[in-house]
Amino acid sequence: MSWKGLFSKKTERVHVPPPRTIRGHFQIATAALPNPEYSRTSGWWAGVLTGVGITPAAVIHEESALIEKWPEEGQVVPVVITLSSPIKFKIVWDNVPTRREKGLQCAQNLLNTMKFS
């Protein structure tokens, strides 16, 4: 067989369906401290993963994140969970509020609890 024949053969592609996923939530119990020298850094979060059709589980999750959106203890963040392996999930960063947005929400909650005469 010539070299030309080796390179001209078409390889058969196997269709692999995308993994089935569901939306869920990850409630942060504790978090690594972000490195303030960078705008994005790797980190870890320990918490409880929940979603329809899966058993809630205590997990540690590692992922890179923008410091401005770094999840804090007590925060619940939206996630996409892979059903074939529920401990594999991704945080939906587009739906995580920034520190500024969280601060404004806390201020609004404080204002709502104040009584003005």
Image (cartoon, grey):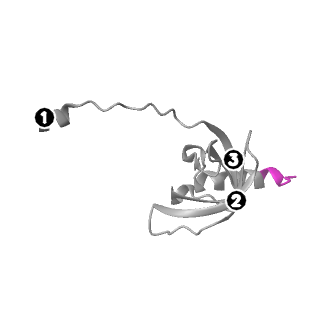
Task: Mark 1 or mark 2: name the one nearer the start of the chain.
Answer: 1
Which residue in the structure is indicated by mark 1? Answer: 4
Graded by Cα atoms within 10 Å as few (under 14), some (14 to 19) or many (20 or more), the crowding at tag 3 reads many
**Label 1 close to label 2 by CB (< 8 Å):** no
The magenta stretch is: 111-117
Q: Is residue 115 magenta?
A: yes
Q: Percent from the top left, x then y, of residue 91?
A: 58, 49
Q: Is residue 9 magenta?
A: no
Q: CA distance from mark 1 to mark 2?
A: 56 Å
Foreground: 53 or 73? 53
Residue at 74%, 39% (x, y): give it: 53
Q: Is residue 98 left or right of residue 37?
A: right
Which residue in the structure is indicated by mark 2? Answer: 47
Kindly state the secondary structure of the residue where label 3 is placed: strand
Q: CA distance from mark 1 to mark 3?
A: 53 Å
Foreground: 79 or 16? 16
